[in-house]
Amino acid sequence: MKAVLSFLRSWRHFVWIAVAALLSACATTTPSSTDEGEVVLSQSFERGGRFAVTMQEFAGERQAVQGGFTWMERQGILQIDLTNPMGTVLARVLVMPQGASLQRTDGSMEYAAGPDELVEQLLGSPIPVAYLRTWLQGQTRVAAERDEQGRPEAFVQDGWRVRLQRYDGKGPRLLQLNRNDAQRDISVRLVIDQ
């Protein structure tokens, strides 16, 4: 029984790491121009798939979690549902102009002024918000290696090393994000199924 409780506590900790890692890469900022031209994002956008997050602490501890996600953005409101491998919703994140919230399966909530602050609450340390919203749509605001069709393939933005691959009509179907900071290495892999 003690081992089961320990596993459940660890699983919850991993889920919050996954939420934080995904949120640390999400923003609903206004697009800005790049040397490639204006970044144009869809006002209504949906994607879904699987995620895997690995965090390697420099102190030696390694943590990993995987599951599914659904990304739904409409009229300036972003909803991200995170599910376990069996498909059960573990957490729902809402990002609106008024702020960001995370609802757990037990009904408890976390609130913050924005995704940056929510990540800091969940992780206990600040992580700058990157631009997953633009990356999911195959856009970036920085110089990037590009494929034959001119789509971004590899670049570095706000400390994240990003690879976008397997494009369809909406954007990349494989996103690989890596970040190294003073305490840990974080690796996020998103595989888009829909």
Image (cartoon, helix red, strand yellow):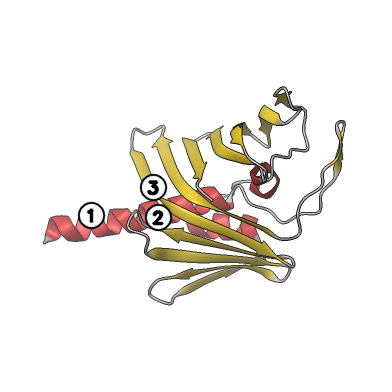
Question: What residue does disc 1 label?
Answer: 7
Amino acid type, residue under disc 1 in the picture? Phe
Q: CA distance from mark 3 to mark 2?
A: 8 Å
Query: Horizontally, is 104 left or right of 86 in the view?
Result: right
Q: Which residue is mark 2?
A: 15
Cα separation, mark 1 vs mark 2, equals 12 Å
Q: Residue at image x 37%, y 64%?
A: 88
> Does residue 74 appear left or right of residue 118 in this picture?
right
- Tell me, yes or no, if residue 181 can be seen here: no
- Among all residues in the image, which is located at the extreme bottom? 107
Amino acid tagged 2? Val
Q: Nearer the viewer, mark 3 or mark 2?
A: 3
Check disc 3 and give the amino acid type.
Answer: Gln
Q: Quadrant of the N terminus?
A: bottom left
Q: Secondary structure at mark 1?
A: helix
Of the numbered discs 3 and 2, the one sitting upstream in the chain is 2
Spot the residue most to the left. 1
Q: Earlier in the sequence, mark 1 or mark 2?
A: 1
